[in-house]
Amino acid sequence: MAEPITQAPNSSTRVLDRATLVLNRSWVPIHVTTVRRAICLLFRDAAAVVSPSTMQTYSFAEWLDDGHTHFDAWVSASRHRIAAPDVIQLTAYNRVPAHRAPFTRRNLFARDGHTCQYCSTRFRTDELTIDHVVPRSRGGPTSWINCVVSCVSCNARKGDRTPLEARMRLMREPKCPRWSPYLGLSRRQHLPTWQAFTGRVTASS
Ligand SMILES: [Zn+2]
């Protein structure tokens, strides 16, 4: 069998970047990945496709053979057209990740809703910075409880001072968010078919 995805025509590129829900072996949602990565996992038999309507699982070969006429998102690869999976299940992995969300730039922006925590204005990602509430120069750690999203202007105004010294108020006390497989994902990236596995479709932040 040929490599699954080597080159995707333009129409497929967007589909490849679409979100796919990842379940562990016990059907617990643990992650959200891209269709691109999901297809690689399927190709290596590390995962199976789950049909959200029937809960039936398919190996990669079975998934290729099946008609999937009700699917509207397709990826072209080699001689095949592959229906983009909404949900996959890992065949071996059965753990649930630790319930502390990893501290990453993307997760921090999601926690603060892309909103400057000083002026309460929502910005695009490239217009935002990370502010250390207690400045690094004073030993302030880079962590969930000492970092907030700030716009460039508020960050410059605050400078190397604490909020108290700069007379700037934080919207809320920064905390470590609860881990969620959907952390960092916007609501519009959620697929309606995930509801069968999550009970509800919510954006976390
Ligand atoms: Zn601001």
Image (cartoon, rainbow, N blue to C red):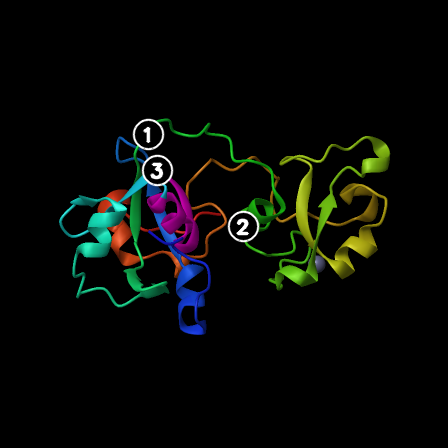
Cβ of mark 2 under 8 A from ligand 1: no
Please tell me how crowded label 1 is: few (under 14), some (14-19), or many (20+) other residues with Cα within 10 Å: few
Q: Which residue is mark 1?
A: 92
Mark 1–mark 2 Cα distance, whole angstroms, equals 30 Å
* Region rendered in magenta: 29-43
Residue 40, horizontal then vertical, whole percent: 40, 48
Number of the label disc, if any, that sits on residue 110: 2
How far across and down, in percent of the image, does residue 132 sit? 74, 42
Residue 30 sits inside the magenta stretch: yes
Q: Which residue is mark 3?
A: 46
Q: Are marks 1 and 3 in contact (CB under 8 Å)?
A: yes
Indicate yes or no: mark 3 CB to ligand 1 under 8 Å: no
Quarter of the figure with residue 56:
top left
> Residue at image x 18%, y 65%?
70
- Upstream in the sequence, badge 1 or badge 3? 3
Numbered circles on residues, count: 3
Say the numbered circle drawn on residue 131: none
Say left or right for 138 vs 27.
right
Amino acid bearing label 1: Ala
Q: Residue at x 81, y 50 (%)?
A: 158
Residue 95 position within the rendered picture, expressed as x and y whole percent measured from the top left: 37, 26
Whether the magenta-drawn stretch holds residue 103 is answered as no
Which quarter of the picture shows residue 75? bottom left
Most foreground residue, 198 or 59: 59
Depth check, mark 1 against mark 2: the one in front is 1
